[in-house]
C-alpha cells in the first residue's frame, strides 16, 4: 500500500485551566483527546461533529498553528511535530488552510493583489513580474478576473471572497488543503458553487483535502471518507457512502437521523438526543457519549471504547461492536 500523505497518531490538545492565587494548573480542557487517522494522496477526508467537538483544533494542529499536547503528525512520512519553527514555516508551503470567514481572514486594507502576493513573497518568489503573473493566473483559476486584483475585500460578495481565500491557499502550490467550514458562512445558493470549485481544483492540481464541517450534508457531497468527532474523539470513520448508508455508532445514527432525506425508502426514525454535550474540561469516564447514548449499558460508564475496524475500512468506537 502506498504511504498516506498525512498520518496522525494519538493526537491530543489539552488546554490548561489555571486557578487559585498562584495561577497553578487546576485542570485541562481536553479539546482533542487522542485522535488517529490518515489521508491518502488525492482524497478528501471529511471531519464532522457539533461545535466544540475538536475538529477545528485538529485541523489547526496539522499545520501546527496550535501545538499538540501529545501525539504525532506525519506528512509524506516525515514527523512534523519534531520540526523547528523555521523548518515548519518552509513545510507550510505544502499545507495551506482555507478559513470559514473569508472576510475576517483577508486584510481589509490590502488589495487582492497584495493579499495574493504575500504568500509568494513569504515563500521566496522574488521576481515582481513573476508574482503579478501568478496573481493573474490564480484569480482566473478560482473563477475571478484579473482586473479584480486592484480591488479590496469589501468590494466582493461572500462567495467571491471565499474564492480569494482559496486562491491565497493555492498560491504556493500546496499538496494539502485544510478547509475549516469553508462554506458555512455562505448562502446556501452559493455553497454548491464553492464546493464544485474545490472539487474541480482538486482534480486539476491533484490536491488532498481535510474538509471540516458541522453540516453532514455538505461533507457527504465532497468527501471520500468521513470521520465523526464527539468530545475530542473520533467515534466513527468510514467511506462516505458506507457511513451514510450504514452508520454504526449511535451518535452518527442520531446525527444522520436529523438530516432531511428526500428519499422515503431510506428515511430513518429521528433520534432525539437527551441532554447537552458534556464539558471537555470534565468529560465523562468510560465512553464519552454514554451520558446521552440511547443504547448505553453498564460497561459504557466505566470503560472507554477504542476505535476498531468493525468491517473492512469501517472503524467505530463502541462496545456494541466488540
Ligand atoms: Fe453508546 Fe456504549 Fe456504544 Fe458508547 S460504547 S456509543 S455509550 S453503546
Image (cartoon, grey):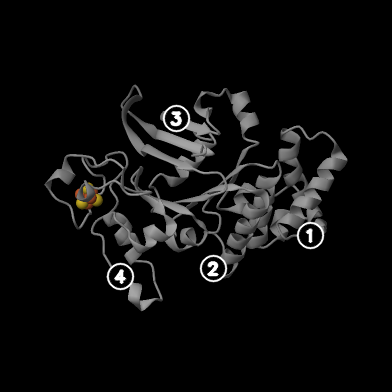
Mark 2 or mark 3: whose residue is earlier in sequence: 3
Q: Nearer the viewer, mark 2 or mark 3?
A: 3
Which residue is more in the foreground, 279 or 319? 319
297 relative position to 54: left or right: left
State whether residue 204 appears in this view.
yes
Where is mark 3, residue-wise?
72
Mark 2 or mark 1: whose residue is earlier in sequence: 1
Q: CA distance from mark 3 to mark 1?
A: 41 Å
Q: CA distance from mark 4 to mark 3?
A: 38 Å
Q: CA distance from mark 2 to mark 3?
A: 37 Å
User: Is disc 4's CB within 8 Å of ligand 1?
Assistant: no
Residue at 12% across, 46% down: 298
Where is residue 160 drawn, in percent x and y? 68, 60
Q: CA distance from mark 2 to mark 4?
A: 24 Å
Mark 1 neighbour density, 10 Å: few (under 14) some (14–19) many (20 or more): few
Where is mark 1, residue-wise?
145
Label 2 close to label 3 by CB (< 8 Å): no
Up the image or down, 46 lies above or below 29; here it is below
SS class, disc 2: helix
Q: Quadrant of residue 131?
A: top right
Amino acid at each position: 500500500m502506498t504511504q498516506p500523505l498525512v498520518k496522525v497518531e494519538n493526537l491530543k490538545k489539552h488546554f490548561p485551566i489555571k486557578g487559585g492565587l498562584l495561577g497553578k494548573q487546576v485542570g485541562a480542557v481536553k479539546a482533542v483527546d487522542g485522535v488517529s487517522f490518515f489521508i491518502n494522496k488525492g482524497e478528501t477526508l471529511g471531519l464532522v461533529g457539533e461545535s466544540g467537538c475538536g475538529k477545528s483544533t485538529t485541523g489547526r494542529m496539522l499545520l501546527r498553528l496550535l501545538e499538540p499536547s501529545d501525539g504525532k503528525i506525519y506528512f509524506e512520512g516525515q514527523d512534523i511535530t519534531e520540526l523547528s519553527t523555521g523548518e515548519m514555516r518552509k513545510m507550510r508551503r505544502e499545507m495551506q488552510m482555507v478559513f470559514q470567514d473569508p472576510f475576517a481572514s483577508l486584510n481589509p486594507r490590502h488589495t487582492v493583489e497584495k493579499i495574493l502576493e504575500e504568500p509568494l513573497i513569504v515563500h521566496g518568489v522574488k521576481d515582481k513580474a513573476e508574482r503579478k503573473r501568478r496573481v493573474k493566473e490564480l484569480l482566473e483559476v478560482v473563477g475571478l478576473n484579473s482586473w479584480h486584483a486592484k480591488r479590496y475585500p469589501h468590494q466582493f460578495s461572500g462567495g467571491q471572497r471565499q474564492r480569494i481565500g482559496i486562491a491565497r491557499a493555492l498560491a504556493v502550490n500546496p499538496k494539502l488543503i485544510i478547509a475549516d467550514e469553508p462554506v458555512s458562512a455562505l448562502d446556501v445558493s452559493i455553497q454548491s458553487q464553492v464546493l464544485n470549485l474545490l472539487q474541480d481544483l482538486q482534480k486539476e492540481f491533484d490536491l488532498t483535502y481535510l474538509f471540516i464541517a458541522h453540516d453532514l450534508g455538505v461533507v457527504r457531497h465532497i468527501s471520500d471518507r468521513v470521520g465523526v468527532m464527539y468530545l475530542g474523539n473520533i467515534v466513527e470513520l468510514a467511506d462516505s457512502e458506507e457511513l451514510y448508508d450504514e452508520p454504526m455508532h449511535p451518535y452518527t445514527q442520531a446525527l444522520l437521523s436529523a438530516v432531511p432525506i428526500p428519499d422515503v425508502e431510506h428515511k430513518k426514525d429521528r433520534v432525539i438526543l437527551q441532554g447537552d454535550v458534556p464539558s471537555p474540561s470534565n468529560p465523562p469516564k468510560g465512553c464519552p457519549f454514554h451520558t446521552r447514548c440511547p443504547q448505553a449499558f453498564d460497561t459504557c460508564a466505566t470503560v472507554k471504547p477504542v476505535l476498531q475496524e468493525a468491517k473492512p475500512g469501517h472503524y467505530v468506537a463502541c462496545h456494541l461492536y466488540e
